[in-house]
Image (cartoon, rainbow, N blue to C red):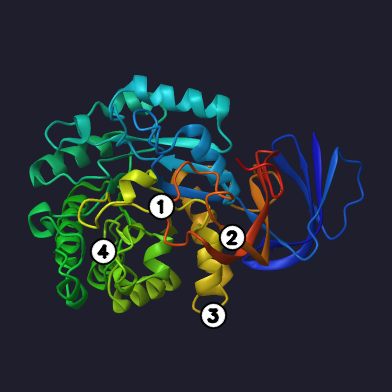
Amino acid sequence: MKILITNGKAFINDELVQKDILIEDNRIIKISDVIEEASDRVIDAENKVVLPGFIDLHTHLRDPGQTHKEDIVTGTAAAAKGGFTTICVMPNTYPVVDNIATVEYIQRKAADLGKCKVKVIGAMTKGSEGKEISEYAIMKEGGIVAVSDDGGCVQNAKLSQNCMKYAYNFDLPVIVHAEDYNLAGSGLVNAGKISSQLGLGGIPGLAEEIIIARDIMLAESIGVRLHIAHISTAKGIELVRKAKADGISITAEVTPHHLTMNEDAVYDFDTNTKVKPPLRREKDRLACITALKDGTIDYIATDHAPHSDYEKEKEYNIAPFGINGFETAFASLNTFLVKKDALDLATIVKAMSEKPAQFLGIKTGKLAEGYLADLNIIDLDAEIEFNRETMLSKSINTPYINQTLLGKVNYTICEGRVTWEAGEIER
C-alpha cells in the first residue's frame, strides 16, 4: 500500500521544511518538495507538522493482571492517539515479567491487537522483590530490551551490583527507579514547605539522589549501560551530568509532568497529582528543562501509569501514585513549554523520537528515506479537550482532565499503517 502525505511541514534535520512524503508498505521511500505519484491514499497535511513517531521508554499497560486499569488494546490505542508508534512496558504486572512466558504473552497480544509496537522490559529481580536475580538470558532470547524493577528499587547494593554484572553480559541496559525506601518512608509529596503546610508526609530529593549516586558508582565499575528513570531533582541531574563528563555510560529521562508542573499542583489535594517521584520544587523543574536543552537528560518518557477512578477517588494518603500520560504528553509539552518559549519544538521531538530510537537500536525516530514509516501529523495550534468521552485509555487519572490543551494529533502512522485518525469513533 502507498500513502502520500502532501503539503505538510516535515521535521527533517531539526527543522520544519515543506516536503511531501511517500510511504510504501512499511517504509518511507521518497521525500521531496513535490511528489506526483499514484497512491492508494493521499493525506493533506496543510497547516500541520509531520513528525517522527514518538517512542516512549517508560510505560505501564497493567496487562496481565490489572486490566481493569488498562490493557494492551486500550493502552496502545491511547498511545497511538498521543502520536506514539513504539512503547516500552515495565515489568510490574501480575505476574511480574520475570519469565519468558509473560514476555511472550505481551508480545503476542501486542502484535495481534496493538495499535503501536510494544517492547518488553524484564524484571531485574524475581517478582521484583529485590531478593534474587531474574533469568535475563532466556528473556533476552525472547526479546526484552532492558531490565528494571521500576515501581520499586533494589535496596541491596551487592544485589544491584550483581544484577548489573549479569545485565552487562547480555548487553542489557539497567533502568533504575531511584528511591531509597528508608529516606522516602511513607512520604506522599515532595518534602519541604508545601508538605508541611498540607500536613502530608514528604519524600526528600535525597531519597532519589543517593540511589543515583550509588548506581553511578556501580555502573562505572562494571561498564553496564545505566539509565535513570523519571529524574526529578536538580542535584540528581548534576550527578548525571558529572557522570557523563567522566565517560560513564549513562542516560536519563524526564516525564512531561515533571517538566510542566511543580509541587504547587498538589495544593488542592487532587490525587491526580500524586506521583513517584513527587512533583518537585520550581527550581527542580527548571533544572529539568535546562538539562533537556543541554543533553544531560536524553529522553522524555511518560511513565504512563493508569489507575481506575475508584482508586484515585480516595484521600490523598490512600490513593495510589501515578499519572495517565499517553494522550496528554505532547499536548502538555507543546502548550506549557513550546508555546511559552521555554523549550523549542526540536528539543522535544528529538527527545521523544530520534534519541529513544537510538537507545533501542531501531531504524526509526527520523523522517528519512529507507526508515520505517513511523510518524504522526499534528496541528500545533488546534485545541484538544481531555475528558472521559474523548480519552481512549480506560483510566482518566491525569491532572489535565477536563482541560483544553494545544497540539492535536490528526494521524499516527505505524510502519505504514494508520493507527489513529482524528474524528474516528473513540470509545
- Residue occupying the point 39% across, 60% down: 255
- Residue occupying the point 62% across, 66% down: 14
N-terminal label among 1 and 2: 2
N-terminal label among 2 and 4: 4
Quarter of the picture holding the N terminus: top right
N-terminal label among 4 and 3: 4
Residue highlighted by disc 1? 397
Q: How many marks?
A: 4
Mark 2 and mark 4: Cα distance apart in space: 41 Å
Tell me the amino acid under the disc marked 2.
Glu
**Image coordinates for residue 348, horizontal then vertical, percent:** 52, 65
Is 417 on the left-hand or right-hand side of 202?
right
Which numbered dot is residue 341?
A: 3
Badges 3 and 1: C-beta atoms under 8 Å apart? Answer: no
- Quadrant of residue 98 within the rendered picture: top left
Which numbered dot is residue 327?
A: none
Which numbered dot is residue 243?
A: 4
Is 401 on the left-hand or right-hand side of 91?
right
In the displayed structure, would residue 145 be above or below residue 386?
above
N-terminal label among 3 and 2: 3
For the question of whether residue 295 can be seen, the reply is no
In the displayed structure, would residue 142 be above or below residue 243?
above
N-terminal label among 3 and 1: 3
Tell me the amino acid under the disc marked 1.
Asn
Is 207 on the left-hand or right-hand side of 58?
left
Quarter of the picture holding the C terminus: top right
**Image coordinates for residue 330, horizontal then vertical, percent:** 54, 60
> SS at mark 2?
strand
Is 108 on the left-hand or right-hand side of 81?
left
Mark 1 and mark 2: Cα distance apart in space: 14 Å
